[in-house]
Image: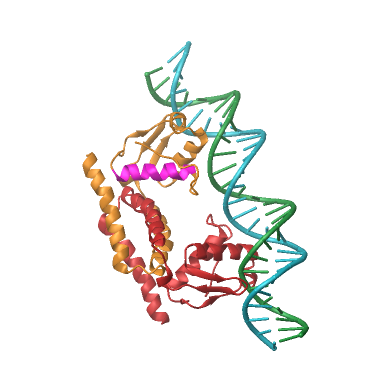
Chain colours: A red, B orange, C green, D cyan
DNA sequence: AGATTTGTTATAATAAAGATAGAACAGATT
DNA sequence: AATCTGTTCTATCTTTATTATAACAAATCT
């Protein structure tokens, strides 16, 4: 999986990595059960520090998206391993964005279309990879 | 409009304020053209620093949601004043959330239902207020 | 078994962001 | 004229983000 880091971005590097891993799973480039590169080799590939990658992994583990096996490595979790709190957190994250969309003048339909088209993008690239 | 600040939240105060103002507009508690409290009085009401409120306002102005009249005050902008870049930024913000929703195991329908129910919440409280 | 790789832990340093504080300025409002 | 407004400036403090070394012990590989 190819990950690109924008050092000048306002979003921190460890979140850029985490988000792109999540995207990679959604697109089917990587699958549950597969292992992620070690924090050291990943950091070397990206040209960044080991601890930054480590922070990404723990961020993903906290979300329940990966499982870190101490002294061994990290693997992508299966969807059935997720808890209800994941969805609660997602709701809280969606709320301000939907509010802003409405304030900006988007209609109910426009917002739905935006969401649908984005889901399709992920599902399409998943079909291509499978 | 009532704004509640959680000092222990991981989301910065200036964003809590901005998000709740956006929500207030979406809910119809405040309307385009209306003026926001001055940064000093608002800060006094919330028990926080003037500069934190000022940062909120400039954050909202950058999004195009309010207009700051120098040396005078801030008013809520009208939806027609918004540019296309607002929607582009929103797309980028939605992307990681939708990816995560899919990874967590939510179906296309479940995501749509989540979005729809949230939009309804805003629209309902808007009808009540009007 | 021995060497290597793994995540973990600890300490340290730097830079940026978030928040507060106080003060002064000049335009706008009353 | 007095007050209120956002603006600007300096300053301090805390937290977060990132990098840098180093050492440790469990897991893995050869």
Does B77 sit left or right of A20 as displayed? left
Quarter-of-image position of residue C6? bottom right
* Residue B125: in magenta span: no
In the picture, measured across the screen, residue A13 lies left or right of residue B27, that is right
Occupied quadrant, residue B76: top left
Question: Where in the figure is residue A50, as x and y percent of width and height?
Answer: 64, 66
Quarter placement of the C terminus of chain A: bottom left
Residue at horizontal 36 percent and vertical 74 percent from the top: A123
Q: Residue at x 34, y 71 (%)?
A: A120
Residue at 41% from the left image edge and 59% from the top image edge:
A85
Q: From what the image shows, is residue A110 above or below residue A30?
A: above
* Residue B118 against residue B51 in the figure, above or below: below
Residue B15 forms part of the magenta stretch: yes
Q: Nearer the viewer, residue B81 or A127?
A: A127
The percent coordinates of residue C17 (x first, y second) are 56, 48
Q: Measured along the vertical axis of the image, is residue A18 above or below residue D10?
A: below
How many numbered discs?
0
Write the start and end of the magenta stretch as one range.
Answer: B13-27
Q: Is the magenta stretch mostly helix, strand or loop?
A: helix
């Amino acid at each position: 999986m190819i990950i690109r880091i924008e050092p000048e971005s306002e979003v921190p590097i460890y979140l850029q990595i985490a988000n792109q891993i999540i995207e990679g799973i959604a697109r089917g480039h990587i699958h549950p059960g597969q292992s992620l590169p070690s924090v050291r080799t990943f950091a070397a590939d990206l040209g960044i520090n080991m601890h930054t990658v480590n922070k990404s992994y723990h961020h993903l583990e906290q979300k329940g998206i990966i499982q870190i096996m101490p002294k061994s490595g990290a693997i992508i979790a299966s969807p059935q391993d997720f808890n209800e709190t994941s969805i609660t957190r997602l709701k809280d994250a969606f709320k301000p964005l939907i509010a802003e969309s409405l304030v900006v003048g988007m209609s109910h339909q426009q917002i739905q279309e935006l969401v649908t088209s984005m889901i399709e993008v992920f599902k399409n690239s998943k079909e291509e990879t499978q």
